[in-house]
Amino acid sequence: MGEDLRQHIMKIKEIAPKLNAVMDSANKSVAELEATLRSCGIGIEVRMYFDCSADELTDYFVGYQRSKSGRGFCFVIDEVRVIERSESHEVPDTTEIVDSWDWQDAPRDLRLKSLKEITEIVSEISNDAEELLQKSSASVESLNLLKESLLGNSVPQPEILAEDGDEFIVRSPLDRPMRIPKSKLRK
């Protein structure tokens, strides 16, 4: 038994510096990634489940969200206790957050196990930002047209895509083709 213990101690001594180097590199990379995302001021929250618990009643999530410690947006790991499992995937489990850490302050094993999801979160933020931009741009354009028409300001002429008899086909505020009689539009 003593020889087995000695081998395990030797193995730990061999692995520890390598594991520390990996952790140092991950800490640096995540800190730089957080700083870059924070400088963009994107403000989009994304959370993802990651599997690292042997306990069926504990789930872990990593997310880019507003920090509970006041650091602004950063990566956060939440430990969630499942109070009641749902029978259906359509209804979420009943849960409560047991613990929450800014990523840099979370236990080492959770940080290392969440690295894959962090790359997926960045991809999701990018996709969400693009979708939000498209939806918001159309809404803002519609609001501006409405505001200008209510205030009596001249309404900007829509982009004419084609002519069809007595009508123009124009680009609507929602970026869709729309027919307008030529008499209603100044050319």
Image: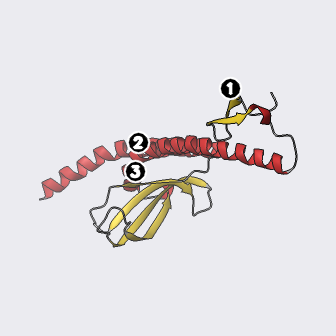
Q: Is residue 28 visible?
A: no
> Which quadrant would the N terminus be assigned to in this image?
bottom left
Q: Residue at x 63, y 37 (%)?
A: 175
Q: Is residue 86 above or below residue 16?
A: below
Quickly name the residue at label 1: 165
**Disc 3: CA contacts within 10 A as few (<14), some (14-19) or many (>=20):** many
The Cα–Cα distance between marks 1 and 3, rounded to whole angstroms, is 61 Å
Numbered disc in front, either 1 or 3 = 1
Q: Could you tell me which secondary element the residue under label 3 belongs to?
A: loop
Taking depth in this image into account, of 26 and 52 the one nearest to the observer is 52
Tag 2–tag 3 contact (CB < 8 Å): no
Q: Residue at x 87, y 44 (%)?
A: 153
On the image, the x and y values in percent for residue 68 come to 57, 63
Could you say which disc has been placed on residue 114 in the image?
Answer: 3
Occupied quadrant, residue 72: bottom right
Numbered disc in front, either 2 or 3 = 3
**Disc 1: CA contacts within 10 A as few (<14), some (14-19) or many (>=20):** few
Taking depth in this image into account, of 98 and 183 the one nearest to the observer is 183
Quickly name the residue at label 2: 21
The Cα–Cα distance between marks 2 and 3, rounded to whole angstroms, is 17 Å
The Cα–Cα distance between marks 1 and 2, rounded to whole angstroms, is 72 Å
